[in-house]
Image (cartoon, helix red, strand yellow):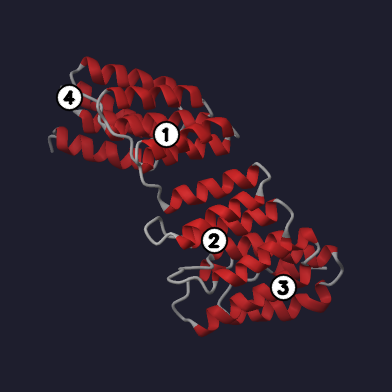
Amino acid sequence: VTCDTIIYSTLIKGFASIGDADRAMALFQDMRTDGVESNHIVFTALINAHAKNGLMKRAEQLMEEMEKEGCKPNAITYSSMIRGHCVRGDLSSALQVFEQMVDCGFRADAVIFNTLLDGCVQHRNFDLADELLLKMKNTKVAPSNFTLSIIVKMWSKRGDLDKAFEVVRSALEDSTGPKVDAQVGACIVGACIHNRAPERALEIFEEMKTWPSFDGPDNNTYAALISGLPRLGYLRKAVELTDEACVRLNTNPGQDKRLLAPSALAQLFRALRCERVLQELGPSLAAKLRKAGMAVDDKWLAP
């Protein structure tokens, strides 16, 4: 079978989607050997594959090759480059690519801003995050629910839990803005745990169950509480919440079994052992988990 540009680009995109830069490049070399012409889809996929792995030197070389061959980068190409620089924590280079993209006539959307904002929060460059949020507002780019989750994480890392709550409260009151979804809910609970405020975590957890059209609490919310509360002196409350999740699993056959993350459960059983209440609480908890269809590692119950 003779491979043409379409077949090669499809295969390269496949390997790029899973971040397998080596196999994507091997196909690209085969493409060159066979004399098959490249296009912007091929180059963008290759750049994406390398950017996902933070291999930005090679990604930049591919960008140069792309332009030499007359293939113009598109918004996806620039987005991949920005994401790659953010993965490496090179926010200066990410911002340069962002400005280059805008200069070339592409409008930055919420996805691009979210990529930059997430990079800023991950690498604790909060001043740049503030600048980007202002730029986002001035250019009238509507935030998404993912933007909300990033902002909540940002204020959590800055140690200002009140600001994180203010973001959520404002979004709940604004019917025209982004919806507060399960991801945002998990972030505000996680922010409370991170800032050692278990009572506020439990309060907002109960409150979110009353939010209109709310699709949570989800597995990340339960994981944050079940693994975090024992560290803050609320071990028995973590057990109660695990019981609650088991009830949800039993009463709703369609409920995703991932509601209880094995890693969070393992941490809970370790806490039971450390606090010397494993024999008291462990067997009944394990029985409830098994009844709910959850796998229980026998090692969790080992004394």
* Quadrant position of the C terminus in the picture: bottom right
Return the x and y of residue 117 as percentages of the image width and height. 48, 38
**Front position in the image: 27 or 153:** 153
Q: Which residue was labeled with disc 1?
A: 135
Disc 1/disc 4 C-alpha distance (Å): 46 Å
Q: Which residue is mark 3?
A: 239
| Residue 155 visible in image | yes
Check disc 2 and report its element: helix, strand or loop. Answer: helix
Q: Residue at x 73, y 81 (%)?
A: 284
Name which residue type carries label 1.
Answer: Lys
* Label 3 Cα crowd, 10 Å radius (few <14 / some 14-19 / many 20+): many
At x 72%, y 73%, the residue is 239
Task: State how far apart marks 2 and 3 are (Cα).
Answer: 20 Å
* Residue of label 4: 34
Q: CA distance from mark 1 to mark 3?
A: 45 Å
Q: Are marks 2 and 3 in contact (CB under 8 Å)?
A: no
Tags 1 and 2 in contact by the CB under 8 Å rule? no
Kindly report the distance in space between the C-alpha atoms of the residues bearing marks 1 and 2: 26 Å
162 lies above or below 109: below
Ranked by sequence position, the earlier of labels 4 and 2 is 4
